Image (tube, rainbow, N blue to C red):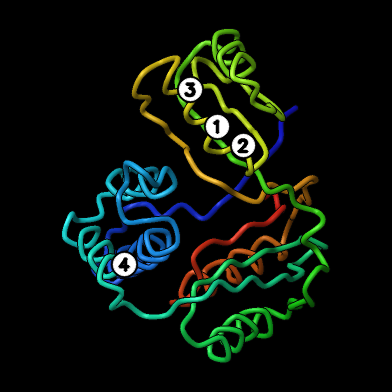
Amino acid sequence: MGRAYQNRKQSMAKTADAKTKVYSRYGRELYVCAKNGGYDPAGNLALRSMIERAKKDQVPTHVIEKALEKAKGGTGEDFATARYEGFGPGGSIVLVDCLTDNPNRTIGDVRNCFTKTKTKLGTPGTVMHQFDHAAIFAFKGNEDAVLEALLMDDVDVTDIETEGDMITVFVPQSEYGKARHALITAFGEIDFDVDEIQFVPKTSTPLTGDDITIMERLLTMLDDVEDVQSVYHDAVF
C-alpha cells in the first residue's frame, strides 16, 4: 500500500550536547515504561524492546541501568505524558508526544515552536483522527513466511510491505505484544530494524519551496525541546 510512516529517529548524534539529549529521552522513556509495566524486561515486553532500541542507538549501559534503578526504587521524577496537535506549512499535520514533569512549561515551549515558524498549534482532537496508532516491525525476512506466522497466531495484520529482503509489518498497537511474540516464536531472535509503536499518517502532504524550509525549522525547534520525545507528521519533502 505504500503507507509512509515517519518518526524522529533517536540515532547516535555527533556532538556531546546532542548525545545528552538522546540519552535523556531514552532515560525518561525507560523509566516511565518500567514504572508502569515492571522493571524486569523478561516480564515487560515493551521495556525489553525499548532497551534493545536504546542499545542499537548506542545509549550507554549505565544510562539504561540508572533509569531502571529509579523505577525499581520509585525515586525518579513524576513524569506524565502530554500530546499536542498542530498544523505545519502547506496544510501538513503534526503530532508531538512529550514526557513532562511540568505541563505548563512544556506546552509553552511547544507553542513557541509553532508561533516562531508561523504555524499553528491546534486543540486536542484536531488532527489525531488523521493518524493510525500502529505497531511497526521492520526486519529481513520472507513475506509469505512472515504473514503465515502472524495469521497462525491470529494476529490482526493491517499491512505488509516488502522492499528487497526487508519486510515491514503494520498491526494495530493493541496487537503489539501478540505480533512480536508470534514473530520471535516463528523465527527466533530477530534483529529488528524497527520495533515500536508509532502514529502513522493516513494521508501525505507534499511540500515544496519555502514550506520545506519552514517544516525543517519547526522539526528542528521541536527537537531542541527537552520534554519532546517523538514527532509525527504527514509531510513529504
Question: Residue 181 in the image: x percent, y percent?
Answer: 47, 28
The image quadrant that residue 96 belongs to is bottom right
Q: Is residue 87 left or right of residue 192?
A: right
Mark 1: give few (<14), some (14-19) or many (20+) Cα within 10 Å: some
Tell whether label 4 touches label 3 (CB within 8 Å): no
Q: Is residue 1 above or below residue 229?
A: above
Q: Is residue 194 left or right of residue 200?
A: left
- Number of numbered discs on residues: 4
- Closer to viewer: mark 3 or mark 4: 4
Secondary element under disc 3, as helix, strand or loop, is helix
- Residue tagged 4: 71
| Residue type pointed to by label 1 | Lys
Mark 4: give few (<14), some (14-19) or many (20+) Cα within 10 Å: many
- Residue tagged 3: 183
Question: Residue 12 in the image: x percent, y percent?
Answer: 31, 53
Q: Is residue 69 left or right of residue 165?
A: left
Tell whether label 4 touches label 2 (CB within 8 Å): no
Q: Which mark, residue 75? A: none
Q: Residue at x 52, y 75 (%)?
A: 80
Secondary element under disc 4, as helix, strand or loop, is helix
- Residue tagged 1: 178
Question: Residue 40 in the image: x percent, y percent?
Answer: 30, 50
Tell whether label 2 touches label 1 (CB within 8 Å): yes
Q: Residue at x 65, y 34 (%)?
A: 171
Q: For marks 3 and 2, give the CA distance.
A: 12 Å
Looking at the image, tell me whether mark 1 or mark 4 is earlier in sequence order: 4
Q: For marks 3 and 4, give the CA distance.
A: 29 Å
- Residue tagged 2: 175
